[in-house]
């Protein structure tokens, strides 16, 4: 091969090599650009469901098109608390404009089904505001299903700023679906005489179906649970309660904390005398019209005080507003084995109401 021919061959090789390199990087830039374009309006998010405490739903399905969730079993995990978030195959997804919802309401024996329109622009603004790092941060879009066909939809975020987590979820819409009776529902779900429904039925007999709790969001008050100070001889081991709309509140025993909460409907308080090993707890149903009583007081700040009587079993709850103290209810707490978890006890059968 001549020297001249060799040089020409090397020039062609270098030229082709440079073209290939240029083509490769052009393709890489195009790929990166397409990827950025694909994720510009997409985020990491999953679908969750929720049902009010004491108002279970079954056969629940939510379908956003690119994400969904479902459950064949009955659940009443607490209003606005996530049940069964499911990871979908697609990491970055478009935000939804609607969601298909279907569920059976236990207390009504009705099935609700339909498509709920969603405020896309509002959802997008919230994701853009709170998701700063798309690779590490994600959102949850949660569908709450209640009696009367009332569906509420919230968003919250898994981000470094914990202040926008589940405790600060944001409601984006509520919608009412039409119901119909479905005779294909399993007997266990329909038969209210079974032992499974005993505790629910007692709650339903007392409060009925408080539809107004889901039509209009229940008001929150600054509530101070003063349980420990008047009862220095007792260990107030734990407290939980649910509100009329089925929101659950746990661990409210810190006497110095006043927090915004909805009013209690079912209160569980556990105590034991420091001098013995006996342990008492039960569910206490608050007065049926407790919300109305508090509303008429026209105060946003209330104190609920517990006084345990000398026999260790009876307790009295007092309402204190503007230094005025009134009896709410006197009840008998039930002896409970230590191995029973909080909330596993029965309802107190010995209850005397003073505020009616």
Image: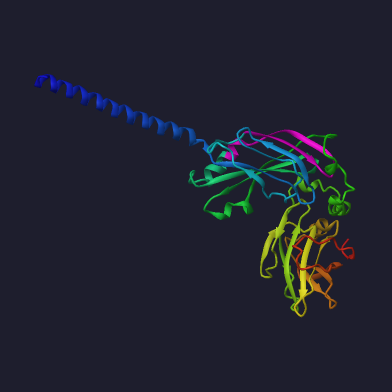
Do we see residue 215 in this rendering?
A: no
Find residue 142 and report its image quarter. Answer: top right
Residue 26 in picture, x, y percent from top left: 34, 29
Let me know if residue 75 is in the magenta part. Answer: no
Is 256 placed left or right of 266 in the picture? left
Is 256 placed left or right of 134 in the picture? right
The residue at 79%/34% (across/down) is 178
Do we see residue 158 in this rendering?
A: yes
Image height of 322 relative to 41, above or below: below
Q: Quadrant of the C terminus?
A: bottom right
Find residue 221 and report its image quarter. Answer: bottom right
Of the pair 263 and 331, the residue shown nearer to us: 331
Image height of 146 relative to 252, above or below: above
Q: Residue furthest left?
A: 3
Q: Residue furthest front?
A: 1
Q: Quadrant of the N terminus?
A: top left
- The region drawn magenta spans 97-123
The residue at 55%/45% (across/down) is 138
Q: Residue furthest bottom?
A: 275
Residue 19 in picture, x, y percent from top left: 27, 25
Of the pair 107 and 184, the residue shown nearer to us: 184
Mark count:
0
Image height of 308 relative to 223, above or below: below
Indicate the colouring scheme: rainbow
Let me know if residue 101 is in the magenta part. Answer: yes
Residue 241 in picture, x, y percent from top left: 75, 59
Residue 71 in picture, x, y percent from top left: 72, 41
């Amino acid at each position: 091969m001549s020297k001249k021919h060799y040089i020409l061959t090397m020039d062609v090789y270098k030229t082709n090599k440079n073209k290939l390199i240029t083509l490769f990087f052009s393709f890489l830039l195009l790929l990166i650009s397409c990827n950025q374009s694909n994720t510009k309006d997409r985020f990491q998010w999953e679908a969750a469901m929720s049902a009010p405490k004491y108002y279970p739903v079954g056969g629940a399905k939510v379908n956003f098109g690119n994400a969904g969730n479902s459950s064949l079993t009955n659940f009443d995990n607490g209003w606005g608390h996530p049940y069964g978030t499911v990871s979908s195959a697609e990491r970055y997804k478009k935000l939804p404009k609607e969601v298909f919802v279907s569920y059976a309401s236990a207390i009504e024996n009705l099935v609700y089904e339909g498509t709920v329109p969603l405020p896309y622009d509002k959802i997008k603004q919230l994701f853009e505001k709170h998701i700063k790092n798309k690779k590490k941060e994600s959102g949850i879009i949660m569908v709450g299903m209640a009696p009367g066909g009332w569906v509420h939809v919230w968003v919250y975020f898994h981000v470094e700023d914990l202040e926008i987590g589940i405790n600060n979820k944001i409601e984006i819409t509520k919608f009412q679906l039409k119901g119909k009776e479905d005779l294909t529902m399993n007997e266990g779900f329909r038969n209210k005489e079974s032992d499974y429904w005993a505790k629910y039925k007692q709650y339903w007999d007392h409060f009925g179906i408080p539809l107004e709790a889901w039509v209009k969001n229940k008001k929150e008050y600054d509530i101070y649970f003063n349980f420990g100070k008047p009862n220095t001889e007792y260990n107030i081991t734990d407290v939980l309660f649910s509100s009329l709309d089925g929101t659950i509140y746990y661990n409210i025993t810190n006497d110095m904390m006043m927090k915004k909460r909805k009013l209690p409907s079912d209160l569980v308080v556990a105590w034991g005398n420091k001098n013995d090993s006996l342990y008492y707890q039960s569910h206490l149903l608050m007065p049926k019209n407790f919300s109305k009583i508090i509303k008429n007081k026209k105060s946003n700040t209330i104190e609920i005080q517990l006084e345990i009587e000398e026999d260790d079993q009876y307790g009295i709850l007092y309402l204190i507003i503007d230094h005025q103290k009134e009896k709410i209810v006197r009840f008998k707490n039930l002896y409970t084995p230590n191995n029973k978890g909080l909330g596993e006890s029965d309802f107190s059968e010995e209850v005397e109401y003073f505020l009616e």
